[in-house]
Image (cartoon, coloured by chain):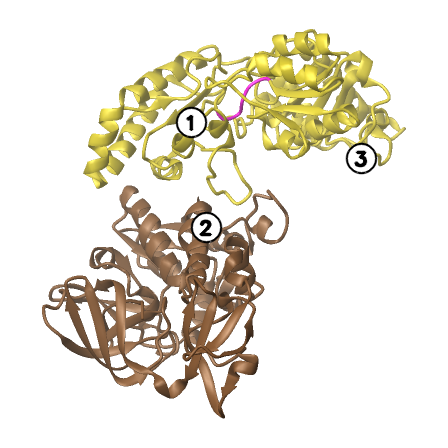
Chain colours: A yellow, B brown
Amino acid sequence: MIYLDANATEPLRPEARDAAIAAMAAANPSSVHGPGRLARRILENAREFLGAQLCARPQDIIFTSGATEANALAIHALGTGRPILIGATEHDAIRAAAPAAVILPVLPSGPVDPEILAAELKAHPGALLCLMAANNETGVLHDVATAGRLCAQAGALLHVDAVQAAARAPQDWLALGAASFAISGHKAGGPMGAGALVLAPAYGENLSPLIKGGGQELGRRGGTPPLPAIAGMAAAFNAAANPDISAYRDRIAAFCESRGAILIGKTAPRLPNTLCLAYPDIRADTQLIGLDMAGLAVSAGSACSSGKVAQSHVLLAMGLGPLAGQAIRVSLPWNFEAKHVLAFNAAYAAMLDRVLHARPSATTDTRKSA
Amino acid sequence: MKIVVAMSGGVDSSVVAGLMAAEGHEVIGVTLQLYDHGAAAGRKGACCAGQDIHDAKRVADKLNISHYVIDSEKKFRDSVISAFADSYAAGQTPVPCIACNQHLKFGDLLGMARDLGADALATGHYVRRIEGKTGAELHQAVDPARDQSWFLFATTREQLEYCRFPLGDMASKADVRAEAARMGLPVAVKPDSQDICFVPSGSYAEIVGKFRPDALEAGDLVTEAGKILGQHQGIARYTVGQAKRLGNAAVNDGEAMVVRKIEPQTRRIIVGPRQAASRHVQLRDVNWLIEKPTGPIHARVKLRARQDPQAVRITTNNDETSLLLDTASIAAPGQAAVFYDGSRILGGGFITV
């Protein structure tokens, strides 16, 4: 099995695994005794390390169960009483937490339309804008710098969902004007179960919690922190990136395009590891199942609890119409190797050949349009 | 062989998956998600699977076969639920299970199975596929209480070649449950599904009203002579041949009335005596599972799912297929008329008048 679904979860990095195992037997970091102090050291070391990595003060980092909670906390703490604007291609973690939000359309290439963003910020004074740094399905990067500048001009707050970008295309989001951003441990190669909301100093204190509980995280997030997942997250962010990954991505893209696939978001800046490939007239689930049977783990659309492959709201928002149901996501993990390029390309070609052979009329159609 | 098994999460299709795996086939379990269970339960946009999908996944896991959930919500809404409502609004009585078999199971799912390079599609239907001299034949199930052949008449001969129905030879449902228990499947004791899957409350009129509110508008109950006997609360609540829910129109001149005709344009429901039944029935969208007959043939026909077949003479002229029943009957437009020769299904069509 070749794993190509890093945007769902990165394979666990060995250094993250070691750190998590080391923290597994820790005591409760809130306890006052010696073992408690040792546990607190693990927790605060992770916080300080992440602060240095993410250009934030340690005290402005709130550990959560994951990025869904971090995003929900940001919308609750920063968005209450404000109009909320969100991009049309945001993740469900944002969309579901802000059901009444104004939806900002995206350009056909993927990023939010800056003209419309400026106009909507004017039309909704004092808004909270939620914008993802990188899209999970296409890898398209949004222009956070421009969004930050426009928000500052309009007196709006900016929250960045940095889940996919934090370890793959990091930026100093607070310096670009964000009031907060959300990260996830397992999307960086840590264990599942931890994420964080990182805030600008002006918003880090006196933040209104979603979960009060025992006053952990300076009263901003109740509940005993999951030390193994947090220690693993910090270690994952310390691990080196794969320098060749965008070259592998481009080799796969070039091959698939030569076979008639359409590379979604091709003209936009994108994450180094993500490809969204549509093939006209072949259902996304047929492609996904065919590749899975050949031992290649890819995905399509946003994962849903039922496992069904739904039509992608992201691709629909980009105006792709029927292609929105005919696209797969190939997201290369940190441990991707050169030999996997050939294996993927061969399996992709075999999948296409099998489907197109089963219905010869479709072959001619798609070859023509491609 | 590589076989795609349509798994609903119920005991029947779970046993099919288990039987196919036990025979050594490469089994790919597929469950069609037909509607958003979150929305059905009133939780908008919940994007969640119902218990049935959960069960199908657990069964596949237990059998150690691969399993996928396919989003068929739009197709199901358009070609089954919406068509169901339209049919009622046109004064007919649809059979949504036939539409689902036609468009989803033996339509999209079968197409996908071919795309995946599978050699066959197996389902948990209680019918038999028998290899005949001129190709695959469709026969009633061994257990008459479970036979579903009436619901499968629209399967084309080409589709039938590709399909497998391992439960058709089972002596009884109890045997299927025993098989499930023997395989250690958690669904062995799961209750049978009831009626129409997308009408959990049993109030199909409510669903029809959502798509076609006009089908629930009040109208007159009249005799064939035009005498108004009462009012009804929507043509969707009536089927030709029905004697219930007629109120004041249930009896006219001392004679019991049944629905004889439904006029969607005027929203009139015409009642008349049951004795005035007819021997003539016209069909549309006829599907033949034998070579299309060139002259009239004698066979037996079922005009409803649960009915003993009766003798019939079937005449096909160009696109017109008409039946001459031995015994006069009241046929409900929209229902299926399915032709049998012994246990074999010869074909069938939808009743127009």
What subunit carries mark 3? A
Q: Is residue B345 left or right of residue B335?
A: left
Query: CB of mark 1 within 8 Å of CB of mark 3?
Result: no
Q: Is residue A327 above or below residue B287?
A: above
* Mark seen at residue A211: 3
- The answer to which image quadrant residue A142 occupies is top right
Q: Is residue A94 left or right of residue B197?
A: right
Task: Residue under label 2, please give it.
Answer: B77
Query: CB of mark 3 within 8 Å of CB of mark 2?
Result: no
Q: Amino acid at mark 2?
A: Arg
* Mark seen at residue A320: 1
Look at the image and say whether residue B128 sits in the magenta stretch. Answer: no
Q: Which of the two marks, 1 or 3, is nearer to us in this view?
A: 1
Q: Which residues are magenta?
A: A133-137
The kind of secondary structure element at disc 2 is helix
The kind of secondary structure element at disc 1 is loop
Foreground residue among B217 and A364: B217
